[in-house]
Amino acid sequence: MPHNDPTSIVAEIRQRFQEKGTDMYAGEAISQTEHALQAAFAAEQAGESAELIVAALLHDIGHLLHKYDEDCATQGIDDLHERIGAQWLVRYFPKEVTEPIRLHVDAKRYRCATDAEYASRLSPASVLSLQLQGGPFDSAEQTEFEHNPWSKAALRLRNWDEAAKVPDFKTPELEYFLTYVQRVLQQQASDTDE
């Protein structure tokens, strides 16, 4: 079976969650998997496309791919999870999935620069990672972000990311959301074949 076969890719993503998904989500009282499921569920509830639901599910897959400790931010390390994740996913997924993921940290930096109320609601772990990620955008960075065609999707993803930190919140299981992953991969494969 080829490595870029949708079933193989889904299996690899499932394995990443099985291996590291039970790790605590950086400084929060939930696991990586719970965070991913809550974000995906929020996107689904908002009536988003399958691609954006998959982006919500996989936005932090970089945390499951890198070799740092879960608490690396407290050690002063920016794990660059948004870049690691997007680079890993871009081999298989369309930009509708990968670009919001690549930009979801930039979306936080943008929101912190333009919305004081949003910045005041960040969790302590998110404040710490913001500092490591470069802090709020300056005006030039804000303008550049606003002109990015994927900025609006990244900002929506950011909202789900921030909300997806609720202990014991019930969502559908990982297998349910992996059906969206399978669907997007199959669509991508058929688009590529045309």
Image: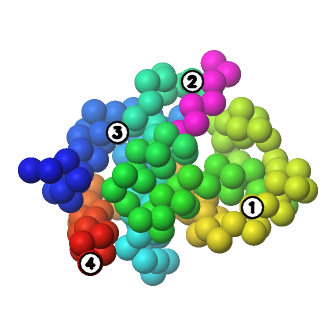
Q: Residue at x 49, y 40 (%)?
A: 84
Q: Residue at x 28, y 33 (%)?
A: 19
The label on residue 145 is 1
Region of the chain picked out in magenta, as a range: 75-81
Mark 3: which amino acid? Gly
Above or below: residue 95 compared with residue 16: below
How far is mark 2 from mark 1, CA to CA? 27 Å
What residue would you read off at disc 4? 194
Classify mark 4: residues with Cα within 10 Å, few (<14), some (14-19) or many (20+).
few
The answer to if 29 sits in the magenta stretch is: no
Q: Position of residue 188 (x, y in %)?
A: 31, 69
Mark 4: which amino acid? Glu
- Mark 2 vs mark 1, foreground winner is 1
Q: Secondary structure at mark 1?
A: helix
- Mark 2 vs mark 4, foreground winner is 4
Q: Residue at x 48, y 58 (%)?
A: 98
Q: Secondary structure at mark 4?
A: loop
Above or below: residue 35 compared with residue 46: above
Dominant secondary structure (helix, strand or loop) of the stretch shown in magenta: loop
Viewer-proximal residue among 170 and 163? 163
Classify mark 2: residues with Cα within 10 Å, few (<14), some (14-19) or many (20+).
some
Q: Is residue 67 left or right of residue 5?
A: right
Q: Secondary structure at mark 2?
A: helix
Nearest to N terminus: mark 3 or mark 1 = 3
How far is mark 4 from mark 3, CA to CA? 36 Å
For the residues labelled 4 and 1, say whether their Cβ atoms are less than 8 Å apart. no
